[in-house]
Image (cartoon, rainbow, N blue to C red):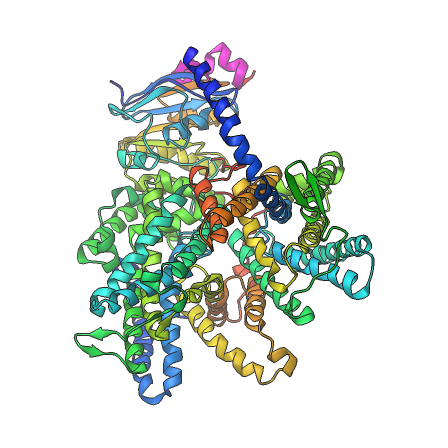
């Protein structure tokens, strides 16, 4: 018992003397990383929503975000609408597109093996990218936000208001979604449909419509991510490649777990920033994937594993 | 030392004790049946023997060898084969293919030999094929040999499942509800096969079953379980007369 | 309708079902052997590319189509084979040694990713392979002493006992030879216990284990063989392009290989070949189609991936069994005429969640 107490005190001391100052000095990187990570987390959230409901893995989620950002750009910079109005309209438009995507395309592949659906969404991603290139071109675009160029300070820590907006926005969105899924009938209906579609049908749940609604919500979440990230990285058709890192985030957290997706995203965002600063150039991108592989080797189903095992 | 022993076998899932301190012996050459209501832990015991689950307590011994912690793929090689309650056949393969996979535990070919399909590999393939044909003859599956599992009716699939287990040339055969989903005729056939397996092939059978007439017909000894615990063990007649068993399971 | 009368077990074990099959395959082989003598250099090169894709496709098909392990980063193995071979040749190693060594290097890389992923399933495995491929791409770009980094690595032509294969026709025959050998090896594997074990893992891991299949061993072998075959394709690819750059082996290439598998027809070696023909011919088809498209569309930089995407989507929606599947349906139609029923190939949909788990 004594030994444990002594060790415990030592660890605490070490934490205070070494970890905390490191934390403060790295805080800038950590906060920036957390902000970028929230974006990954939001995209990952979109994946996980669709996956929890329909067991579809949507590799085109990043490209939905890209389309959303472009549509917002069109409303705000080209049509000239105020920021919040353009934002809202973009969410609505993409929600409709998400709904239509499920109703027109994904509905016909329900029940096919996962691999086929993965390939389908990968294909869709490429199509979106090409369409975006055709409509908006390959020149990077951007629009003004109420947060650009402003900063907020809290003690030794400075944070750009875009980053602050990302973090706050993510938190608000998650709270809204949480309430939606736990307190409404639709949330329960979505759970039922994901467990056993046939039985859900028999219970009178309009499964197809429910799934399409999930896609609509997911597309909306993607737009939020896209609009929030646009000050950080310019909008071009390749913006969707963030989706691959977001995928890594969702897997890291445990595919099927919403808090896991967010945590995974934030983790990857922070690791990236730290790696970009401390490791040789070019390691930034790879670091996220190294971390991912490392975690998966130890915990093959992610941090908050939600594995369903086949019952024999 | 009996052929197969379970000693104080236990497994808990969270707080639920699915199997609680179960002890039984199976003698070589007999048909031993486990009965009990749904959720009693019967299939769980099979899954423990197949090593799909890890026991939280107790030991399993087969032919003198402690198999409690072996990896699942070693079990077939020792001579224990099983069928599954919900039929775990390979759907997109033919009956022949499924039965040939049953021969996997007797694989003696090397990877290089297979890639080059050396004459030795070819000979072994032909030998596997001959053994599988014996099983097909035994179970009258010749008509279905080249058909895909997903095109077959349920009754035939059950027989193929049995065939695949027999193809492993087991010493102990675990049958999980062999008559479930079968009609009266098919159940009669199954009873005859179990008897043939015991007398002609000399295989010891450990069975989980609900159909009491089938149990009475083929079993040498019966074990009754409820809530993971042993209620009673004995001949079919003894167990069917036991008061606790009647109250928990048989009714009346 | 041809009725195959079976007289011996050998007939089932053999790769071809009857003399007719052997005849047609033989004819095809003779035709391919004769082709370079009549065909333009350019088309000989195109066919060589198709053979190389075929070898890589067989590798990927073994892993994805037969063992059910999704690999989203297979181009990494292509690259490892290509760089290993090119590097060894630049150090003076004869081709007949560097070529198998390149395959071995790729196979070892396959084991390197196969072992950590043994406990992963489905989407986790797929993302892990993707992460692996991205890391490998990073290594290609930064390991300057071996790969030359972004400067690239020139590839000397293959040297067989002093005779250098400089003509495109010669690479053609080399690629064809390797393709036939790999095809044979793959077919052999699939008719042996290991091949059956791989299929068992795809369909039901739990009952595969109960039949004595060692999951870890079989999955590792599947990864190793698949990566090895793809590595050999990569080595030939190096000679085909004669100059390697790290971004040759990017995600798009991996997706194209998967496109090959899906379009060709998942779960069959024929599918790998059909897919290779499709993928190899596609850029040409697009180039020809460009002439007919309005200028604005034709000049667009991102057109090719977009077309890949559309094709992928259309195939999954309308012909999930790929070209091979469509060919089987057509053959069955004529064999059963006029009794053919469209529902013959209707796949049982998996509505229950546990049916889709493994």
Instruction: Tell whether position B236 is magenta.
Output: yes
**Residue C219 placement (x, y as % from top left):** 36, 48
Question: Going 39% across and 59% down the picture, which residue do you hit?
Answer: C142
Magenta stretch, main secondary structure, is: helix
Q: Examine the rendered structure and indicate whether residue A134 appears above or below residue A190.
A: below
**Residue A75 picture quarter:** bottom right
Q: Examine the rendered structure and indicate whether residue A99 appears above or below residue C300.
A: above
**Residue A119 placement (x, y as % from top left):** 53, 58
Question: Going 74% across and 36% down the picture, which residue do you hit?
Answer: A179
Q: Examine the rendered structure and indicate whether residue C348 appears above or below residue A70.
A: above
Q: Nearer the viewer, residue C343 or A21?
A: A21
**Residue C213 placement (x, y as % from top left):** 33, 43
Compared across the picture, whether C162 is left or right of A290 comes to left
Q: Nearer the viewer, residue C12 or A90?
A: A90
**Residue C52 placement (x, y as % from top left):** 36, 70
Instruction: Tell whether position A240 is magenta.
Output: no
Can see residue B19?
no
Compared across the picture, whether A294 is left or right of C212 comes to right
Can see residue B45?
yes
Q: Which residues are magenta?
A: B229-250
Q: Nearer the viewer, residue C191 or A103?
A: A103
Compared across the picture, whether B8 is left or right of C338 comes to left
Q: Nearer the viewer, residue C27 or A39?
A: A39
Question: Going 23% across and 55% down the picture, which residue do you hit?
Answer: B112
Quarter of the picture containing the N terminus of chain C is: bottom left
């Amino acid at each position: 018992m004594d030994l444990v107490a002594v060790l415990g005190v030592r660890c605490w001391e070490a934490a205070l003397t070494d970890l905390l100052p490191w934390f403060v000095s790295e805080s800038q990187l950590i906060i920036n990383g957390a902000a970028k990570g929230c974006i990954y987390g939001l995209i990952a959230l979109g994946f996980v929503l669709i996956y929890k409901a329909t067991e579809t893995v949507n590799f085109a989620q990043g490209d939905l975000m890209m389309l959303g950002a472009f549509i917002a750009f069109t409303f705000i910079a080209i049509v000239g609408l105020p920021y919040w109005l353009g934002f809202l309209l973009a969410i609505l438009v993409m929600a409709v597109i998400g709904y239509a995507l499920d109703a027109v395309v994904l509905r016909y592949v329900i029940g096919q093996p996962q691999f086929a659906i993965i390939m389908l969404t990968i294909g869709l991603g490429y199509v979106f990218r090409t369409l975006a290139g055709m409509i908006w071109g390959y020149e990077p675009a951007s629009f003004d936000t109420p947060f650009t160029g402003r900063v907020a300070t809290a003690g030794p820590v400075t944070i750009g208001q875009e980053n602050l907006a990302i973090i706050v926005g993510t938190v608000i969105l998650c709270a809204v979604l949480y309430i939606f899924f736990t307190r409404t009938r639709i949330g329960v209906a979505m759970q039922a449909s994901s467990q056993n579609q046939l039985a859900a049908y028999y219970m009178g749940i309009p499964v197809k419509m429910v799934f399409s609604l999930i896609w609509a919500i997911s597309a909306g979440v993607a737009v939020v991510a896209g609009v929030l990230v646009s000050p950080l990285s310019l909008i071009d058709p390749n913006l969707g490649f963030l989706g691959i890192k977001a995928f890594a985030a969702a897997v890291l957290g445990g595919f099927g777990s919403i808090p896991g997706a967010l945590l995974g995203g934030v983790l990857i965002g922070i690791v990236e920033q730290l790696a970009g600063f401390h490791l040789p150039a070019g390691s930034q991108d790879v670091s996220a994937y190294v971390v991912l592989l490392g975690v998966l080797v130890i915990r093959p189903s992610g941090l908050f594993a939600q594995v369903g095992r086949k019952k024999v | 030392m009996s052929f197969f022993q379970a000693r104080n076998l236990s497994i808990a899932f969270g707080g639920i004790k699915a199997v609680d301190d179960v002890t039984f012996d199976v003698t070589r050459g007999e048909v031993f049946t486990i009965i009990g209501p749904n959720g009693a832990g019967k299939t769980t015991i099979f899954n423990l023997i197949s090593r799909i689950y890890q026991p939280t307590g107790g030991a399993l011994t087969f032919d003198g060898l402690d198999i409690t912690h072996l990896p699942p793929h070693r079990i077939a090689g020792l001579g224990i084969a099983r069928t599954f309650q919900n039929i775990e056949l390979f759907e997109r393969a033919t009956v022949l293919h499924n039965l040939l996979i049953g021969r996997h535990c007797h694989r003696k070919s090397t990877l290089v030999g297979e890639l080059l399909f050396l004459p030795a590999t070819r000979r072994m393939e032909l030998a596997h094929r001959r053994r599988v044909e014996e099983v097909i003859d035994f179970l009258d599956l010749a008509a279905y040999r080249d058909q895909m599992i997903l095109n077959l009716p349920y009754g035939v699939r059950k027989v193929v499942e049995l065939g695949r287990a027999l193809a492993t040339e087991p010493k102990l055969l675990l049958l999980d509800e062999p008559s479930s989903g079968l009609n009266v005729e098919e159940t009669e056939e199954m009873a005859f096969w179990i008897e043939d397996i015991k007398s002609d092939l000399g295989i010891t059978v450990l069975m989980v079953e609900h159909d009491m007439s089938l149990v009475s017909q083929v079993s040498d000894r019966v074990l009754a379980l409820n809530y993971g615990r042993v209620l009673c063990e004995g001949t079919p007649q003894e167990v069917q007369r036991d008061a606790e068993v009647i109250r928990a399971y048989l009714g009346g | 309708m041809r009725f195959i009368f079976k007289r011996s077990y050998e007939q089932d074990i053999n790769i071809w079902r009857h003399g007719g099959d052997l005849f047609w395959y033989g004819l095809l082989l003779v035709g391919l052997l004769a082709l370079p003598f009549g065909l333009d250099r350019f088309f000989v090169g195109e066919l060589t590319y198709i053979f190389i894709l075929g070898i890589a496709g067989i590798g990927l098909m073994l892993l994805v189509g037969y063992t059910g392990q999704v690999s989203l980063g297979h181009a990494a193995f292509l690259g490892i084979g290509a760089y290993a071979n090119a590097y060894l040749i630049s150090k003076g190693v004869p081709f007949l040694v560097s070529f198998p060594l390149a395959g071995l290097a790729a196979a070892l890389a396959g084991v390197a990713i196969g072992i950590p992923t043994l406990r992963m399933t489905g989407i986790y495995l797929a993302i892990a392979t993707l992460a692996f491929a991205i890391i490998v791409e990073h290594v290609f770009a930064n390991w300057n002493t071996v790969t030359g980094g972004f400067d690239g690595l020139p590839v000397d032509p293959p040297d067989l006992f002093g005779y250098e294969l400089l003509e495109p026709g010669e690479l053609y025959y080399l690629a064809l030879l390797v393709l036939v050998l790999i095809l044979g090896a793959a077919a052999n594997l699939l008719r042996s216990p290991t091949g059956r074990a791989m299929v068992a893992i795809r369909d039901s891991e739990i009952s595969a284990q109960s039949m004595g299949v060692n999951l870890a061993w079989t999955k590792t072998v599947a990864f190793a063989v698949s990566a090895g075959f793809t590595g050999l394709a990569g080595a030939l690819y190096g000679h085909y392009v004669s100059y390697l750059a790290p971004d040759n082996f990017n995600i798009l290439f991996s997706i194209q290989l998967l496109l090959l598998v899906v379009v060709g027809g998942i779960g069959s070696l024929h599918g790998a070949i059909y897919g290779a023909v499709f993928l190899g011919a596609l850029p040409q088809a697009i180039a020809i189609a460009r002439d007919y498209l309005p200028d604005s569309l034709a000049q667009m930089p991102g057109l090719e991936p977009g077309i890949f995407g559309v094709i992928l989507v259309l195939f999954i929606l309308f012909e999930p069994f790929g070209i091979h599947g469509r060919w089987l349906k057509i053959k069955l139609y004529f064999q059963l005429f006029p009794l053919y029923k469209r529902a013959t190939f209707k796949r049982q949909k998996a509505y229950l969640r546990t049916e889709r788990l493994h």
